[in-house]
Image (cartoon, rainbow, N blue to C red):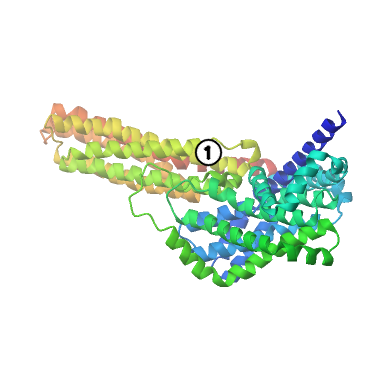
């Protein structure tokens, strides 16, 4: 019974450690994520600055995976080359060691202070950023409490026979330790938590230093596996070369360090007799050595990666998403940026549908009807992918600004898809009936319809601009287009009836088709306005009312 309770205590302490790491990472990401992304992007032009940026951003985020996702999104978009991305990852790998170095000292006495300050900031803070920093304080306190608890809980395990057998295997076969630690890190999604756990085991003498160092190598290997297995699902090789390159340099580093472990281990223990500090120093030294070894050869290494992973030459399925990276959900700002880019692809697809509809009307081309149907299927596929991707987020774990942006993306995608449905089912249906019956609009009537389609294309581009910039002035101009289209509809309807009375090329048979086209084009415009203008104007109105209440 006592052994069972001790195992529960051990599992609970590990769970508390993982949760503390999670709170620190999410709190930092929600507070500084977008700002760190801009800082990282600005530093990528110079290799040395890129290394320092990767180190600094990861030291703050405490997640090399999150940094890797940012850099992968830059690489996938063609904004940086592979060498700069690999340089950032070398810095990121060093950056994750800093919190381990800090916690290798006995700072457990300040744990209650961290929790107290964190709770006060979280409960009393009126600003979102203050509450998120409170989460960071609570998370740091929980990590320290968990580490202190682990040291007490591990004492009874030193003489457990089954544990001694397992640890004996780890001590005598280091490759087993590497694989075990890599698997544990991949499952935990946190090399920091696993390294801290190894430090606790080493501090109590549960595992010898030689085995602890092998476990550290496995943790460094495991943290590079996550981005490869759970990274970008699209067909862009640029998004896959970077995580594979990072994994490859880790594999090479682990192989070399494992071969030299019999010499490195005793030398490090003689320099640093404290087992916990020795583990932290080995972790830092390993990543610094990797950076020193790979920094001069990144150019040939990147060329080798390009040769191994060449660009795809075949055309990709346009209905498949390119920027919805499942692993990016760990950093909402990156995930939402990818979803925004995917939504802009929908706008491009809708413009292609509008141009196809114009060609069908102007040239009487029946093939454009089937082509528009295929394009609408692409639009439907992208909309479904975006919705499935975004609805998987937990709103409670996201900042208010991220939740607002998520709703804006869903609103934009939904309205663009509805506009495409109106084009495919209604407008192209009318065009199909017209061509089937051999009917032709009057010259003036056709010019009116084509003019409205051109105006819709301009409004679509304005809607996309408002969606990305959230500019209130442009949003108001776009919203005014709804009234403008009402006026266009009224004027076109009146002109159509005048031509019908005067025999200006219009017939009773084309009258209904013409008016139906005008009505449906107005519906398309309403969706374009609702896609971007209304969310921005609503947000501006809420800010204004909040300012008035504050000043009042």
Image location (x, y in percent) of residue 466: 46, 48
Q: Quadrant of the N terminus?
A: top right
Q: Which residue is mark 1?
A: 390
Residue 273 in view (yes/no)? yes
Look at the picture and state if 103 lies above or below 118. below
Image location (x, y in percent) of residue 252: 59, 61
Which is more toward the observer, 167 or 273? 167
Classify residue 91 as left or right of residue 116: left
Look at the picture and state if 72 lies above or below 363. below
Task: Residue at 61%, 59% (x, y): give it.
Answer: 250
Look at the picture and state if 271 lies above or below 67. below
Classify residue 353 as left or right of residue 465: left
Task: Residue at 58%, 55% (x, y): give it.
Answer: 68
Task: Residue at 84%, 41% (x, y): give it.
Answer: 157
Image location (x, y in percent) of residue 498: 17, 33
Classify residue 536 as left or right of residue 427: right
Image location (x, y in percent) of residue 62: 69, 53
Residue 125 in view (yes/no)? no
């Amino acid at each position: 019974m006592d052994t069972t309770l001790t195992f529960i205590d051990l599992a609970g302490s590990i769970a508390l450690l993982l949760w503390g790491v999670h709170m620190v990472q999410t709190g930092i990401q929600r507070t500084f994520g977008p700002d760190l992304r801009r800082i990282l992007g600005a530093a990528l032009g110079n290799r040395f600055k890129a290394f320092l940026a990767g180190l600094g951003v990861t030291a703050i985020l405490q997640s090399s995976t999150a940094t890797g996702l940012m850099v992968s999104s830059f690489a996938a978009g063609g904004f940086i080359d592979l060498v700069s991305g690999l340089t950032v990852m070398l810095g990121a790998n060093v950056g994750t060691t800093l919190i381990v170095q800090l916690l290798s000292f006995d700072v457990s006495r300040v744990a209650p202070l961290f929790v107290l300050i964190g709770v006060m900031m979280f409960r009393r803070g009126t600003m979102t950023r203050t509450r998120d920093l409170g989460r960071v304080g609570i998370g740091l306190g929980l990590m320290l409490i968990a580490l202190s608890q682990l040291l007490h809980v591990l004492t009874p395990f030193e003489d457990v026979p089954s544990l001694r057998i397992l640890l004996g295997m780890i001590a005598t076969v280091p490759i087993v330790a590497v694989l075990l630690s890599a698997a544990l890190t991949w499952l935990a999604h946190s090399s920091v938590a696993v390294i801290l756990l190894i430090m606790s085991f080493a501090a109590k003498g549960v595992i010898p230093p030689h085995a602890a160092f092998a476990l550290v190598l496995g943790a460094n290997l495991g943290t590079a596996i996550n981005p490869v297995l759970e990274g970008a699902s699209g067909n862009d090789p640029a998004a896959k070369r970077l995580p594979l390159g990072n994994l490859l340099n880790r594999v090479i580093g682990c192989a070399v360090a494992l071969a030299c472990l019999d010499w490195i281990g005793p030398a490090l223990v003689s320099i640093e007799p404290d087992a916990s500090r020795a583990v932290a120093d080995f972790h830092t030294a390993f990543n610094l050595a990797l950076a020193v070894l790979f920094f001069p050869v990144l150019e040939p290494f990147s060329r080798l990666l390009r040769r191994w992973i060449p660009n795809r030459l075949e055309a990709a399925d346009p209905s498949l998403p390119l920027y919805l990276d499942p692993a990016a959900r760990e950093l909402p700002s990156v995930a939402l940026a990818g979803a925004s880019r995917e939504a802009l692809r929908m706008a491009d697809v809708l413009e292609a549908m509008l141009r196809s509809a114009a060609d069908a009307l102007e040239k009487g081309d029946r093939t454009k009807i089937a082509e528009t149907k295929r394009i609408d299927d692409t639009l439907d596929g992208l909309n479904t992918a975006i919705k499935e991707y975004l609805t998987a987020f937990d709103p409670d774990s996201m900042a208010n600004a991220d939740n607002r942006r998520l709703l804006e993306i869903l609103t934009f995608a939904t309205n663009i898809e509805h506009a495409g449905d109106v084009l495919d089912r209604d407008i192209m249906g009318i065009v199909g009936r017209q061509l089937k019956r051999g009917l032709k609009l009057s010259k003036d009537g056709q010019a009116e319809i084509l003019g409205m389609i051109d105006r819709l294309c301009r409004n679509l581009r304005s809607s996309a601009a408002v969606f990305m910039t959230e500019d209130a002035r442009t949003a108001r101009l776009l919203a005014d287009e709804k009234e403008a289209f009402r006026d266009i509809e009224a004027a076109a309807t009146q002109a159509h009836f005048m031509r019908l009375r005067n025999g200006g090329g219009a017939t009773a048979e084309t009258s209904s088709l013409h008016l139906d086209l005008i009505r449906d084009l107005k519906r398309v415009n309403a969706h374009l306005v609702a896609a971007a203008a209304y969310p921005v104007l609503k947000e501006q109105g809420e800010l204004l009312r909040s300012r008035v209440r504050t000043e009042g």
